[in-house]
Each structure stands twice: as structure tokens, then as C-alpha cells.
Amino acid sequence: MAGGGSSRGDEGKKKARIEIIPLIDVIFFLLATFVLFTLSLSRIQSLPVQLPVASGTPQKPDDDMVTLQVSDQGTYYWNKEPIGQNELEPRLHSYRTQVQLPRVLIAGDNKARFGATAYALDQVRKAGIEQVSIETQVRPTGK
């Protein structure tokens, strides 16, 4: 038996092979399952918002709106006219009784203190004026 090609014990054994195609199928199935599962977990929670609609007609300037500016020294300006802190409350009450729809714009210069601005906002609310705007642009004092 010399010179024979193979021994008798090797003929019955087969080599183990890894089949790649079924492995890829299983991996894609698991990937799709996890993606769908994570998408079902995240629910988008939002608030309903009513956006304003633009109109084609230009709006008239606010002639009856009062600009109340606070300066860095704590003084107030009523439509560019300097007033004292003690004049603020009576002016707001008389303005509310004279105008049908009172509106106030509270502005501050670049160094205005928060306390004086909060006081002005409190006085506007005490006067019963509901339409209050706060300007976010910096303007020079008294302008």
C-alpha cells in the first residue's frame, strides 16, 4: 500500500465550511428589527402653533402706542420726554383711560438696570394695560 494517495481515515471526514449568505441574511434581519423597534420608541411630542398670516396691506404706524424708555440712571422717558419715577403711575392710569386700546413699548438703553425696567413693567401691569412689548434692540438714551 505504499504510494497510495490517501489514508483510509481521511475519506469519511468532511471539512467544515462557513456559509456567508445565510449569515448576511440573519444580520440584515436583526438590523431591520432593531431599526424598526427604535423608531417606534421615539414619539415626536410637539405643541400646536398658530403662525401669523401676512397681509398685503401695509399697517399704519402706532400713533397711540407709548414708548417707555429706561435709562442707565433709572430715569424714564415717556415718548422721548423725561419723567420721574413718581410720574410713571399717574401717566399710565390716565393713558389707559384716554385710549381705547392702550399699548406700551418698554425699551432700555445699553446700560439700563434690570430693577428699573422691572419696576416699569410692574407699573404697566398695575395700570391694567395688557398689551406690553419689550424692545430687544439697544437705543441711545432718550431717543
Image: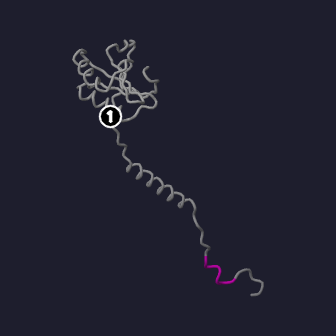
In the displayed structure image, the side of residue 111 where residue 97 appears, left or right: left
Color scheme of the displayed model: one colour
Q: Nearer the viewer, residue 37 or 22?
A: 37
Confirm whether the magenta stretch covers residue 77. Answer: no
Q: Nearer the viewer, residue 80 or 30?
A: 80
Q: Nearer the viewer, residue 100 or 115?
A: 115
Label 1 environment density (alpha carbons within 10 Å; few <14, some 14–19, many ≥20): few
Give the image location of residue 44, x and y in percent.
37, 43
SS for tag 1? Answer: loop
In the displayed structure image, the side of residue 68 where residue 92 appears, left or right: left
Picture quadrant where residue 16 is located: bottom right
Q: What is the tally of numbered marks visible in this picture?
A: 1
Residue drawn at the location 25% of the way across and 22% of the way down: 90
Residue drawn at the location 29% of the way across and 24% of the way down: 88
Give the image location of residue 75, x and y in percent.
37, 26
In the rendered image, which quarter contains the C terminus? top left
Q: Amino acid at mark 1?
A: Pro
* Residue named by callout 1: 48
Q: Magenta stretch: dominant SS?
A: loop
In the displayed structure image, the side of residue 87 where residue 59 appears, left or right: right
Residue drawn at the location 42% of the way across and 29% of the way down: 136
Give the image location of residue 124, x and y in percent.
28, 27
Confirm whether the magenta stretch covers residue 10. Answer: yes
Picture quadrant where residue 15 is located: bottom right
Name, please, the residue furthest toward the right: 3
Picture quadrant where residue 107 is located: top left
Q: Against 51, is 35 above or below? A: below
In the rendered image, which quarter contains the N terminus? bottom right
Give the image location of residue 74, x and y in percent.
38, 30
Q: Against 40, is 123 above or below? A: above
Q: Which residues are magenta?
A: 7-13
Q: Against 11, is 112 above or below? A: above
